[in-house]
Amino acid sequence: MGYIYSEETKELVEAVRDFCNKEVKEPCKEYDRTGEWPREIYQKAMEMQLHMLEIPEEYGGFGLDRVSVAAILEEMAQADAGFALTFAVSNLAVKGTLMFGNEEQKKRVFHKIVEGSFGAFALTEPQAGSDASNVKTTARKEGDTYVLNGRKCFITNGGVAGVYLIMALTDKAKGLKGMSAFIVEAGTPGLSTGKHEDKMGIRCSNTCDVVMEECRIPAENLLGKEGEGFKIAMQILDIARTFVGCLAVGIAQRAMNEAVAYGKERIQFGKPIIKNQAIGFKIADMAIKIETARQMVAHSCRLMDVGFPYGKESAITKCYCSDIAMEVTSEAVQIFGGYGYSREYPVEKLMRDAKIHQIFEGTNEIQRVVISNHVLR
């Protein structure tokens, strides 16, 4: 394990590992097949308070540093990436409120999550993926309220969240400078969700449209100031990208573990296939890539924890970790041979789970734009 953390965090990481091995890994195989959202598993995880990792202690949470959170999320991702993603994305509502919320907003959002709700972050729209400037959702001011109208898509936790951070235009004429951020609670009239997406991977996470039709919220639900929405969204995504990389490392680590175990058991030409140098070198390359990726996650987290700039490093982390997750899972399938292509074995699922990490929170093509812009500056 490439993370350096306290003895207290070590105990928590070990408890999470034990929980995931007993309660998450095997049950999620069936939920991956059915596409159902495993509510009972999440309820058990909440009993362990795994939804409170980044909420400060004064609001009832653990208040963990980001290196510790990464270590815990990686353990979750090794069991099931969709399960880990649910908690990682819920933390985006926490991060946004921590950075930009006032005291009343922090108390309200954190209390809702501590009491057993998930958070969701809603920026993407059908016509606005990589091009965030094409957002169409609007928020018009009427007295002491805002009225939201629009549709968000591919929203993780969209159908199960208790609180949403929603980006909407308060001044369409200003484009990105007219975007604002809002806290919207589940159950608000005019807020609804679409059907759960039938996804290729991360099938134990909930993903759906979030629709606002004359959704009226109090003016005090504005996060930050009018026109700061794009800045807020980008700063949240800067942090989120590191944790996407963290989940990808968890997937890759699980794939290597499975490949090693299978390679020791599979006998061909009178010896375990792991004894063949061709297989041994594949495992070595996996280990090199995984540990390098993990160190990039840890480095990016440390920069965040000490307050140093981390935008370039977070983009590198997301891009590199997700790329190596696809490489490692593909090689794991190759080591399993024909069995790797069968649903009876775990590596095909890991390969499906890995792919989305090259796409969401900014595609890896967009990350390379971000990285090159940092370098050229």
Image (spheres, rainbow, N blue to C red):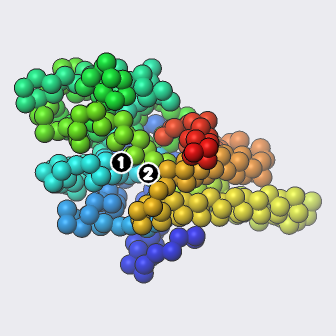
At label 1, counting other C-alpha atoms closer than 10 Å, the crowd grade (few under 14, some 14-19, many 20 or more) is many
Instruction: Give how far across and how far down residue 190 sits, in percent.
Output: 19, 24
Which dot marks residue 227? none
Please state, as top left, top right, bottom left or bottom right, where the N terminus lies in the image: bottom right
At label 2, counting other C-alpha atoms closer than 10 Å, the crowd grade (few under 14, some 14-19, many 20 or more) is many
Q: For the view shown, which residue lies furthest in the front direction?
A: 377
Q: Is residue 341 left or right of residue 37?
A: right
Callout 1–callout 2 Cβ contact below 8 Å: yes
Viewer-proximal residue, 207 or 123? 123
**Residue 158 in view:** no
Report the mark closest to the observer, 1 or 2: 2
Q: Name the amino acid type tagged 2.
A: Ile
Tell me which residue sits at (23%, 39%) in the image.
Answer: 225
Instruction: Give how far across and how far down residue 19 sits, in percent.
Output: 42, 65
Residue to which mark 2 is pinned: 239
Q: Name the amino acid type tagged 1.
A: Leu
Q: Is residue 85 above or below residue 123?
A: below
Tell me which residue sits at (13%, 51%) in the image.
Answer: 104
Tell me which residue sits at (34%, 42%) in the image.
Answer: 232
Q: Is residue 127 above or below residue 69?
A: above
Lower sequence index among marks 1 and 2: 1
Residue to which mark 1 is pinned: 92
Tell me which residue sits at (59%, 37%) in the image.
Answer: 369
Which type of secondary structure does the marked residue at label 2 adopt?
helix
Please state, as top left, top right, bottom left or bottom right, where the C terminus lies in the image: top right
Q: Is residue 139 above or below residue 123?
A: above
**Residue 67 in view:** yes
Instruction: Give how far across and how far down residue 295 sits, in percent.
Output: 59, 64
